[in-house]
Image (cartoon, rainbow, N blue to C red):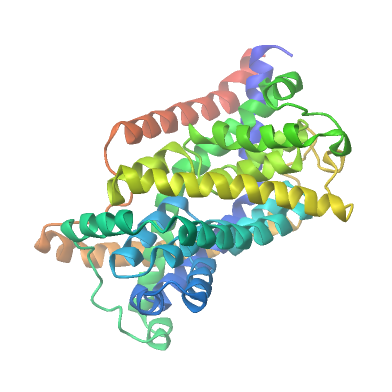
Amino acid sequence: MDFFSLWHQAALISTGYFWMALWAFVLGYIISSLIQVLITKERMQKAMGKTGPRSMALGTFFGFISSSCSFAALATTRSLFQKGAGLAPSVAFLLASTNLVIELGIVISIFLAWQFVVAEYIGGILLILFAWLFIRITNPKKLIKQARERLHNGDEEHQHGDQQASWQSKLTSREGWQQIGMTYVMEWQMVWKDVLIGFTVAGVIAAFVPESFFHGLFPGAGQTEGDLGFLSLLAQTLIGPFAAFFTFIGSMGNIPLAAVLFGNGVSFAGVMAFIFSDLVVLPVLRINAQYYGWKMSLYILALLLCGLVFVSLIMHYGFAAFGLLPDATTVQTATERDHFRVNYGFILNLIFLAISAVLVFFWYRAKHADSGHEHEHGHEHHHDHGGAGAGTWVLRSLVVIAMLWLAGGLLVAPLMA
């Protein structure tokens, strides 16, 4: 195939991947928006002040019912820690909100085998337990004190005045649904750049990158799982996070790319390590440094890297012991899928797009109702990935490139092929 045919194929794969996962995104963010509006941060903070089994369980539970956007999870974790939550429960919340949320499991089930869904949830719990043990052993009291002082000296987070209203009154009032609509739109505002780049990169790699490249990058890739030695598996679990580190792809955007890796012979452990790496990417490291300082940011990075490598290997050998490792040949490759066929996913997309339209309408009404209040107080809320630094400008540039690439692949490439 010539370049323009491959370009067109890459754009079709990217848009097809997104269409397949659209209803899962919408469902997940509806659930997340409802919970964020109905369950206030104050209730979480009061329950997570000490590091103990109860606080860890509550941190995990609150993360499970929270947002799956890595960057939203970082901001909420910062708020919880700033208000007095312990470091271990805060990290439990962070890990649960990016690994145990419902919508992530749905998206994984669309692109990968059921074993990856089970490993995501079991592995997420093991990551939390590992983090708890890591913090107890290292006991970073000095780092915690410095991070709290840094947060205390920063600007206080703006709080909405109606957070004390009961969840029943919010569900039965126009203002409550406007708040849900605003939260739903903000969820998309925080994640759409990562989703766009992640799905675009997945399409490019699926169409252009030959299988031999993955065999060279990941030692042992393409071999049967039984023939892989420990060192090869360890190397793959280390290369997965390294490859993810320099990307801007969040927890939801890296799933189609993980499917590409698995389809090209990367092991179960290597793919799981890549999926777990959404919190060790470069933008997350930079944002944590802005919140807590570089020492604490690097400490959290070391904690997460050690944990995801350990857990990925445990998951691999655990599934292998029961003969449950997934077979890559049973998972359709990107070029084999009929992304736009009329099936249950197509119908669900139409249903959830209609629900989205209703929530966007509530957001629109709330935005115009609150615009005068925001101008009066001289501020507006912005949701980005941590400020207008160099990383943000790189992200914006990649978004523009991705848009031009997809538009050209869908519209121009077929004419040139």
Q: Is residue 303 left or right of residue 296?
A: right
Q: Where is residue 189 in the image (x, y as percent from the top left)?
A: 40, 51
In the rendered image, the vertical position of residue 324 relative to residue 328, given as above or below: below
In the rendered image, the vertical position of residue 220 relative to residue 5, given as above or below: below
Is residue 159 visible in the rendered structure shown here? yes
Number of numbered discs visible in the structure rendering: 0
Q: Where is residue 29 in the image (x, y as percent from the top left)?
A: 51, 62
Residue name at image x 62 percent, y 44 percent: 309
Residue name at image x 57 percent, y 56 percent: 25
Report the front residue among 324 and 339.
324
Indicate the quadrant where residue 201 lies.
top right
In the rendered image, the vertical position of residue 288 relative to residue 56, given as above or below: above
Residue name at image x 81 percent, y 53 percent: 319
The quadrant the N terminus occupies is: top right
Q: Is residue 177 left or right of residue 292?
A: right
Report the front residue among 159 and 168.
159
In the rendered image, the vertical position of residue 97 relative to residue 216, given as above or below: below
Indicate the quadrant where residue 73 lies.
bottom left
Q: Position of residue 90 (x, y in %)?
A: 42, 64
Indicate the quadrant where residue 417 lies.
top right
Q: Position of residue 80 (x, y in %)?
A: 35, 67
Report the front residue among 9 and 265.
265
Q: Is residue 277 left or right of residue 175?
A: right
Is residue 260 visible in the rendered structure shown here? no
Residue name at image x 68 percent, y 61 percent: 122
